Image: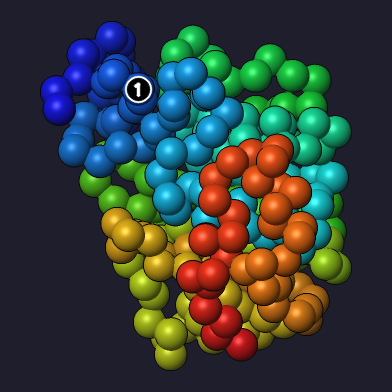
Amino acid sequence: MKGEIIHYTRDALGGILVIDYRKHRVMTFDSVFEQSKIDRRKPHLPVHEYSRAMLLPVAYAQPSHVTVLGLGGGVMASALLHLLPECQIHAVELRSSVLQVAREYFSLPDSANLTVTVSDARDALGRMPDHSTHLILADMYNSERMSPAQAQREFIRQSSRVLSDGGWLSINYHRTPDINGPLFRQLRAEFAVLLLFKSKTNNTVIFASKRPFETMHARDPALVALEKSLPIDWRRLMARVIRLT
């Protein structure tokens, strides 16, 4: 189904399009890849399955501070503010033009609990104090590919440093990293438990927890409660999580 382009702008890194379909609104960067997708009637509701899956750590520990690396249309920030209204959200976005589009076309909340920094995520992460956040959601992509930063050992080290003792890291990869490669060796060195979720679009979300925990059963009542607040099919998503360590 063809959509209607309702906004187009360019900056030094390329074009940014906003496209409306019957039910959804999409942000894309001059490419076939959708950077963000929302339900136009419920803009706080993530549409992409991998975006929904990235929120699963909230079922284990409700954070009071979350860091979002790669704002895009603000889907993660909007969902978290809806689900956890008292939570402090710090989002980092490389492009100020993307932030502007998120505000104007994707209903990014104007909330005292949301702070947005326009910066390279690696620099922003490097400036954060030790143990200063409880959950990091990393979803950094340009028009053609995932940011290489997400696959670097230094990124894993810095994420581990800024996370609290019971903190979680959630990363969206466009393909599954080598489980025996250097990235996973670094993850195993920094985190107590690793989980994996494979989406229907072949995205792989890696979850890393600083503390050991008991894996949650898909029928856990906590997931039913979360579903009432943010209906993204928590139980079905949790049932497809694989424990790696």
Question: What residue do we see at 52% from left, 78% from top?
Answer: 242
The image quadrant where one finds the C terminus is bottom right
Indicate the position of residue 14 as horizontal and vertical percent values: 26, 27
Indicate the position of residue 208 as horizontal and vertical percent values: 64, 71
Indicate the position of residue 51 as horizontal and vertical percent values: 48, 47
Towards the viewer: 193 or 22: 22
- Residue 65 in sight in this render: yes
Towards the viewer: 202 or 94: 202
User: Up-down: is 53 above or below 219?
Assistant: above
The image quadrant where one finds the N terminus is top left
User: Up-down: is 178 above or below 1?
Assistant: below
Question: What residue do we see at 83% from left, 67% from top?
Answer: 166
Say left or right for 216 vs 149. Answer: right
- Residue 121 in sight in this render: no
Q: Secondary structure at mark 1?
A: loop
- The colour scheme used to paint the residues is rainbow
Say left or right for 216 vs 19. Answer: right
Q: Which residue is mark 1?
A: 23
Question: What residue do we see at 39% from left, 32% from top?
Answer: 37
User: Up-down: is 193 above or below 28?
Assistant: below
Q: Amino acid at mark 1?
A: Lys
Towards the viewer: 226 or 62: 226
User: Up-down: is 238 above or below 177?
Assistant: above
| Residue reaching furthest to the left | 2
Question: What residue do we see at 72% from left, 82% from top?
Answer: 192
Indicate the position of residue 205 as horizontal and vertical percent values: 48, 63
Towards the viewer: 200 or 133: 200
